Image: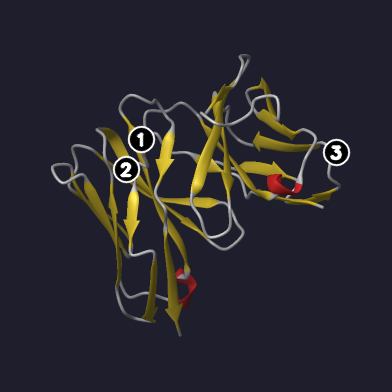
Amino acid sequence: SQQGEEDPQALSIQEGENATMNCSYKTSINNLQWYRQNSGRGLVHLILIRSNEREKHSGRLRVTLDTSKKSSSLLITASRAADTASYFCATDEKAAGNKLTFGGGTRVLVKP
Amino acid sequence: GAVVSQHPSRVICKSGTSVKIECRSLDFQATTMFWYRQFPKQSLMLMATSNEGSKATYEQGVEKDKFLINHASLTLSTLTVTSAHPEDSSFYICSASSGTVTGELFFGEGSRLTVL
């Protein structure tokens, strides 16, 4: 079964608006990470939140983690056209060492 | 952040030939490297985990004789797609771990393989 389901699959917003995407997972995790991928490129690490943390901020990014609901959210505030990309959550399962399992991703389009 | 270099970024080959993709960690020693495959508009699927000096661990459904992985040094892992067929056309991405407790992975830029 897939670890890490994301919704929405796609999101279209105007520049300046906030973008929120969610990730759900199934098993116990050490941490959950969010990555960004521009079309045809590799992944860039955005933020890591540990299982004992509930919220984390990095610049315009805010990540929450609810281990009771096995879910996380990524909020991008004051979006910019350059934020257009696919965003993936990835879980580091307790039983799997550094092996990450990726969610399906959310494609975000920020219109200028 | 740490840099992972992947080469080639694009390769086109004829059906039946073999293609080698290299993944190098440029400024750190990667005890573990991971190889992923990504189809258009889809997520990354882990193919195998490569540990320096030992055999790779393949995910279920991935043919080890088809996708040969070698991790000969702490800075280099290679993926060879043998006897490539059009269905092997995909975006292949490597990532590397330095083995630190943070769990963060560093990704290469990916290699787009097109098999004619």
What residue would you read off at disc 2? A32
Q: Nearer the viewer, residue A92 or A61?
A: A92
Q: Coloured how?
A: secondary structure
What secondary structure is marked by label 1?
A: strand
The x, y position of residue B72, in whole percent, is 69, 20
Kind of residue sitting beneath label 3: Thr
What residue would you read off at disc 1? A92
What secondary structure is marked by label 2?
A: strand
Labels 2 & 3 near each other (Cβ < 8 A): no
Disc on the earlier residue, 1 or 2: 2
Kind of residue sitting beneath label 1: Asp
Judge left or right: residue A61 versus residue A54: right
In the image, residue A87 sits, relative to residue B36, either above or below, namely below
Dots 3 and 1 on the same chain: no
What residue would you read off at disc 3? B17
Kind of residue sitting beneath label 2: Leu
The x, y position of residue B5, in whole percent, is 66, 43
Residue for point 28% across, 44% down: A25
Labels 1 & 2 near each other (Cβ < 8 A): yes
For discs 2 and 3, the disc positioned in front in the rendered view: 3
- Cα gap from disc 3 to disc 1, whole angstroms: 36 Å
- Cα gap from disc 1 to disc 2, whole angstroms: 6 Å
In the image, residue B19 sits, relative to residue A88, either above or below, namely above
Residue B1 in view (yes/no): no
Labels 3 & 1 near each other (Cβ < 8 A): no
Residue for point 34% across, 46% down: A4
- Cα gap from disc 2 to disc 3, whole angstroms: 39 Å
**What chain letter is assigned to the residue under label 3?**
B
